[in-house]
Image: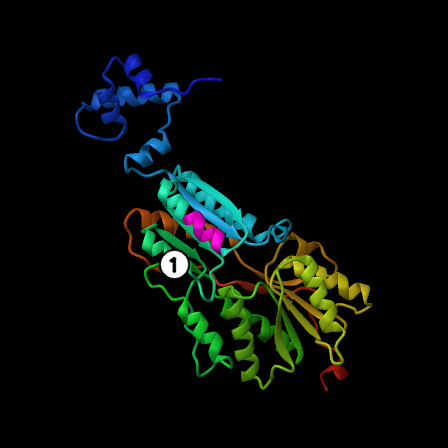
Amino acid sequence: MARRPTIKDIARRAGVSQSAVSFALNDRPGVSQDTRARIRRVAEELGWQPNSAARALSGERSGAVGLVLARPAHTLGVESFFLQLVSGIQEVLSAARTALLFQVVEDIDAECALYRRWWAERRVDGVLVVDPRTQDPRPALLGQLGLPAVSVGECAASPDPALSPDPALSADLALSADPALSAVRADDAGAMVQVLDHLYGLGHRRIVHVAGLPGLAHTARRMESLRTEAARRGLGPDRVRSVVTDYSDAEGAAATRRVLAEPQPPTALVYDNDVMAVAGSAVAAELGIPVPGRLSIVAWDDSALCRVTHPRLTALVRDTAGFGRLAAEELLAVLAGSPAGVRTSERPRLEPRESTAPPPAHTES
């Protein structure tokens, strides 16, 4: 096995002391500019890289940031969202010569335990927090640890109680507020308004939202936005509602079967990701329900799946990789000393395709 070059190797080749090498590589005074340049040139020739563990022990940065995903592993295999998100994050971190330490865990308790271990071991300089909860223990924990963090999606929401049909949900969302935590946010409520505007404009009055995991802040925002906007149009929960799943194709298909078997089934279904939307379209085909002749389908996240399915699925188009880049940029800014803040990504754009059309006239009586 090849031996890693050390400071001693650099000192020997450059003809200087080890302390001079340390001064030069750590940008400290004590050596001339010519000597500093010669030492760095030799270090590059030898392929030397700083030892992150040693730097962490000395109080310097580790050169890495963490990302923990607490979701059932079986739901991640075919969903494109996180792959695109991580690609955007990695693009920014690579340019900054910062490593990404990624781990999947079973639940939120395991995630919190991992943050404590990373902090104690000085493994990461900061973390990107995904899947904010309506009641989220992570912001307080990270604040106690003093571990810099950026939430990918807001951990807080400020719904108007006067407009919300569910005051308890509004209270849950407000409990997760933490102004000290930076965040990048997507306008989930505004995106749901686009979806409902489109379907309502086509004439749909019975709509079911096949949502993702309950307890996630963005799931709650989408559900509340749907209820609020439906109420404004005079549509109660008997006509417009949400059902929750785990984001998987299996649960998306099961939810589709249940709602389509009701005495007055919905004429439109809105799915919280592309995988469930494609699974729901397959269920409709199996049941002999034509899309969009009798059932319209909308996917929250656009992907190749939505574009190759027949009929092609109406979907919300958003720059998920750009969302990841924004989150990574914000975390690097926080690590450089910028104050906490909230940055908003570009609002998703609804792309109407062949899967949505007016419902049959008799179905909306």
Residue 160 spot, x, y in % from top left: 43, 78
139 relative position to 111: left or right = left
Residue 136 spot, x, y in % from top left: 44, 62
Magenta: main secondary structure equals helix
Question: In front here: 134 or 196?
Answer: 134
Tell me if residue 288 comes above or below residue 21 in the rendering: below
Residue 111 painted magenta: yes
Q: Which residue is drawn at 70% across and 59% down?
A: 250
| Residue 24, image quadrant | top left
Tell me if residue 49 comes above or below residue 274 in the rendering: above
- Please rate how many residues cluster around mark 1, counting C-alpha atoms within 10 Å: few if below 14, some from 14 to 19, many from 20: many
For the residue marked with disc 1, what is the amino acid?
Pro
SS at mark 1?
A: helix
Q: Which residue is drawn at 59% across and 70% down?
A: 195
Tell me if residue 50 comes above or below residue 209 in the rendering: above
90 relative position to 236: left or right = left
Residue 330 painted magenta: no
Question: In front here: 223 or 298?
Answer: 223
Residue 152 spot, x, y in % from top left: 45, 56
Q: Residue at x 67, y 54 (%)?
A: 305
Q: Can residue 355 be seen in this view?
A: no
Q: Which residue is drawn at 18% across and 23% down?
A: 31
Q: Can residue 306 be seen in this view?
A: yes
Quadrant, the C terminus: bottom right
Q: What is the magenta range?
A: 109-115
Question: In front here: 94 or 214?
Answer: 214
19 relative position to 155: left or right = left
Per the image, the residue denoted by label 1 is 139
Tell me if residue 25 comes above or below residue 123 in the rendering: above
